[in-house]
Amino acid sequence: MLIRSVAFRTPSRRVTNDDLLNDIRAFNDGRRSAEEIDGYCLKIGKLLLKAGAGTRFVRDRACGEKGFDLLLEAVRAALSDAALTAADVDLIIYCGVGRGFLEPANAIFVAKALGINCDAFDVLDACMGWVRAAHIAYNFLRNGTYRNILVVNAEFTAYEHGLPDVLRILSNEELDYTFPALTIGEATTATVLTASPHAWKFRFRSASEFAPLCTVPLPGFGDFCEADERLGLNGPHRLVSFGAQLSRAAVQAMVAFIDSMYEDTSSIDVWFPHAMAGPILADTANSLGVGNRLYSGVFGRFGNIISASIPAGMSLCAREGRLRRDDTFVLCPATAGMAFALVESAY
């Protein structure tokens, strides 16, 4: 399977940490005292700095910016870069957490907008969505079921799953599982995958005991799981993420996973994790002995862009000249659930 092209787009509204703190001040003005607001902003500012968060992009709703328009822009750019037309696409897989419909498949609306009647379906696995879609695409292409597959996501969740409620002043206990929502950014990617002799190796592991650490529940979620006091703490459609615990578990499991699969990591040109906090990423790179070959160009600039993080990282790394044709890469994301992947191929 060959990655023919990857297109990455973000909304226009760039939000710095200072912008975010100003939004917190404005939201709580009149609700809390100036002293409380200043103290809270000082606390959030330190947490953002510790996490390595810098900027993120969200839709400018006041100007009528829509996520679907950005998605179609990315799709058209990816098709152009791959020297294909919409009519050449045999299958569309939508893999984002951000979605407008529980049914039908969000992918079918992309096909409709492109004016084509190809096969289309959705895949959902939190931040691992793109990797799961690539795995499915690989097997389809290897078997000759399809020739050209388009994988898309539209991670536009800031308003639907947080803003502006997440700006209110929270207790230390609430911050423990709500702060990660302040690092969410918005983005869309489109990837064209085609058949080729390039072999891909997909390896997965899971650790279901950590499932309650990162969730976005639907109304009535209690009928679909065992009772757990960590679930639904922010209400339906709101992220609950115990970030510190989640990061520790993810790093330990991923380092162990890589150590069990790679005696020598020097042959890999670039490693692509899911967007992780800067300090944690640096510690992970040191633990694995991969140094700056563990790509870290996403989180600080764009925030946690969920399933768009991996394809965005590949697109950015290629633009920067750090990922070239025939370079060997490994995708090494960890996702809510928890699930872990090691995916190796040549670019």
Image (cartoon, rainbow, N blue to C red):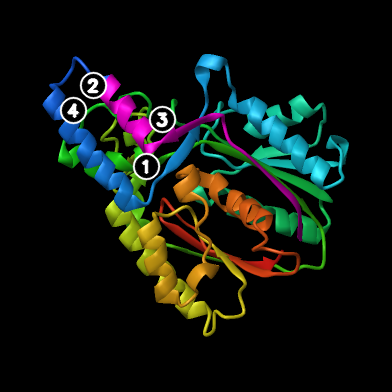
Q: Label 1, label 3: how many angstroms apart (C-alpha)? A: 11 Å
Q: Which residue occupies 52% across, 26% down?
A: 59
| Residue that numbered label 3 is attached to | 161
Please state which amino acid type lies under the numbered disc 4: Ile
| Residue that numbered label 1 is attached to | 215
Q: Are marks 4 and 2 in contact (CB under 8 Å)?
A: yes
Q: Quadrant of residue 28?
A: top left
Q: Is residue 230 visible?
A: no
Q: Label 3, label 2: how many angstroms apart (C-alpha)? A: 19 Å
Is residue 150 rendered to the left or right of residue 164? right
Mark 2 element type: helix
Q: Nearer the viewer, mark 3 or mark 4?
A: 4
How packed mark 1 is, by other alpha carbons closer than 10 Å (few <14, some 14-19, many 20 or more), is: many
Q: Nearer the viewer, mark 1 or mark 3?
A: 3
| Residue that numbered label 4 is attached to | 37
Q: Nearer the viewer, mark 4 or mark 1?
A: 4
Q: Nearer the viewer, mark 3 or mark 2?
A: 2
| Residue that numbered label 2 is attached to | 28
The residue segment tinted magenta is 1-26
Please state which amino acid type lies under the numbered disc 1: Thr
